[in-house]
Structures are given as structure tokens and as C-alpha cells.
Amino acid sequence: MTAQTSRAPLQAPSPLLREQIGSIAVLTLDSPKTRNALSEGMIAALHEAIDSIRDDKSVRAVVIAAQGPAYSSGHDLKELTARRSDADKGKAYFSHMMKSCSEMMQAIVRLPKPVVAAVQGVATAAGCQLVATCDLAVASEQATFGTPGIDIGLFCSTPMVALSRNVPRKHAMHMLLTGDHVSAQRAYELGLVNSVVPAGTERDAAIDLANRIAVKSAYTLKVGKEAFYRQAEMNLADAYTYAAQVMAENMMARDAQEGIGAFIEKRDPKWEDR
């Protein structure tokens, strides 16, 4: 009689690495064989990580980096194409994937902590969208950016949302209609990234930038980030009305009282994040 051994199914390794350097959470896209495509698994892993960071008081800022020659090539086209054999030719799955990706991007925007992209290579389509969605971005001089969906008959409609909120309209339309890639330097000139650094230093530069922000009041960063994105969607009068209310409320916070007092008294503030 042969003994049978039951084995639990092997779990696929996570496509996302997470480490903490001081108060900075570093999330690294770790699927270089797929050019760090935003697959269903990658999107879920990123969303889960962002959600777990939200209330983690040990984390004051986030860096999103990547392994390999590509930052992210966007959606996993092989994964999407495989669902064309579904009864509905994949439409329900495509809708699910676009919704999941959009919700993950919005989770980054809603996170009450600054998020910095560290871009070492090519960022295309939804990968470019991820860079545009982050609050700040540091790019290697070797990085390139593009929305080339037009070249395969698939307009980069969801990447367009983040891109058009970061880049002047005519330049965004040029990228979307031609599929042309832009260099890191051009991305800097267009406002898509904050700085361009020597290749291989982008991760450290992004962490340094995150650390410069992380020493500020976490409460004030939360208030400011939320207000920035909300007022950006308002007309001028409504934006000023809203911002005035936010600033008056912010003045009542303990950290504002401490920060103003420290400035007047010429000393370093002691934040309590409230």
C-alpha cells in the first residue's frame, strides 16, 4: 500500500517587493520578464500595498520603483488577449481590468502620504499612467515615456486621464495620437517628472526626495495632498472658497500652532501629526 502525500499548491511569488527604509516604504515592481506589466496580479499587489500603508504610522512617504530595463510596459496584453476565447470575447474581463487599474491609480491619489516614482527605464501606456499618477517622479536619464496604444489600435484612454492632468494638452495629445516616446529630459520639460538623474541613481534620489518630505508634519501633508487634487478639479472661485476653508481649518491644528510658534521662536518644530 503506497502512502500518498498531499501537497499544498505552490504559490506564485509576488510581483511586488516591499521594504522599508526608515520611514519610507519602497514598493518595487519585480516582474522584469514581463517588463513589469500591470497584470491582474501586479495591480492587485500594488492596490493591497497602498491600502496597507494608509494607516501605517511608521510609513511617512512611498517610493514606487522597478527592477529590470523597463519601469512598466503597461497592461499585460498576453493576459488580456487570452480572454478573447470567453463567451463574451473578453469584454467583461477587459472592463474588470480597466476598472481595477483605475481604482488602484485612484488609491495612490487618495493615499494621505506622498508617493514618488523612481523611473529607471521605459514607462509606456499604463506604466506611463502610473508615473503620472504618483505625486512626484524622479527619472533616470535613460528613462523614456510613451502612450503607444495608437500603434496597436488601442487608444490609451485610461493613461490619458493621468497624462492630461500632468502635461499641457497639446503635448499630451501629441503623445497619445502619435505613440511617440519622449526622453527623460523632454518629460522633465513637459512636467511629467520632477528631475532627471544619472542612470542607476534614480532610486536613491527618489528616496532622498521622499525623506525630505517625510520630516514634515504628516497631518499637514495629508491635508495638503487631498486639497491639491480636489481644488484642481474646481473652477477658480470654487477652488478659492474650498482652499480658504481648508486653510482656516488647518490653522486650528496643533502642528500649525507648533510650526508657526517654532518659526517665530527660531527653533525646530516638534510635530505630533495632528
Image (cartoon, grey):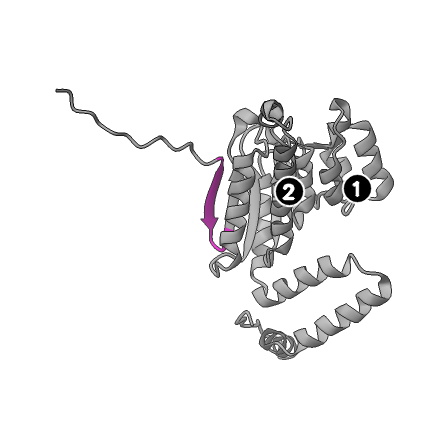
Q: Nearer the viewer, mark 1 or mark 2?
A: 2
For the residue carrying disc 1, how many other residues have a C-alpha within 10 Å: few (<14), some (14-19), or many (20+)? some
- Residue 154, image x, y percentages: 74, 28
Is residue 16 part of the magenta span, yes or no?
yes
Q: Give the mark, 1 or 2, whose residue is nearer the N terminus.
A: 2
Q: Which amino acid type is marked by label 2? A: Lys
In space, the residues marked 1 and 2 are separated at their CA atoms by 28 Å
Q: Residue 190 carries which label?
A: 1
Residue indicated by mark 2: 99
Q: Which amino acid type is marked by label 1? A: Leu
Nearer the observer, 132 or 78: 78
Name the residue rendered at 55%, 46% in the picture: 47
Is residue 192 part of the magenta span, yes or no?
no
Q: Main secondary structure of the magenta part?
A: strand
From the image, which quarter does the N terminus lie in? top left
- Residue 65, image x, y percentages: 56, 40
Q: Are marks 1 and 2 in contact (CB under 8 Å)?
A: no
Nearer the observer, 176 or 200: 176
How many numbered markers are drawn? 2
Q: Residue 79 carries which label?
A: none
Residue 3, above or below 218: above
Nearer the observer, 273 or 164: 164
> Residue 198's image quarter?
top right
Which SS class for mark 2?
helix
Nearer the observer, 190 or 167: 167
Which SS class for mark 1?
helix
Residue range of the region highlighted in magenta in the rendering: 15-24
For the residue carrying disc 2, how many other residues have a C-alpha within 10 Å: few (<14), some (14-19), or many (20+)? few
Name the residue rendered at 78%, 57% in the picture: 233
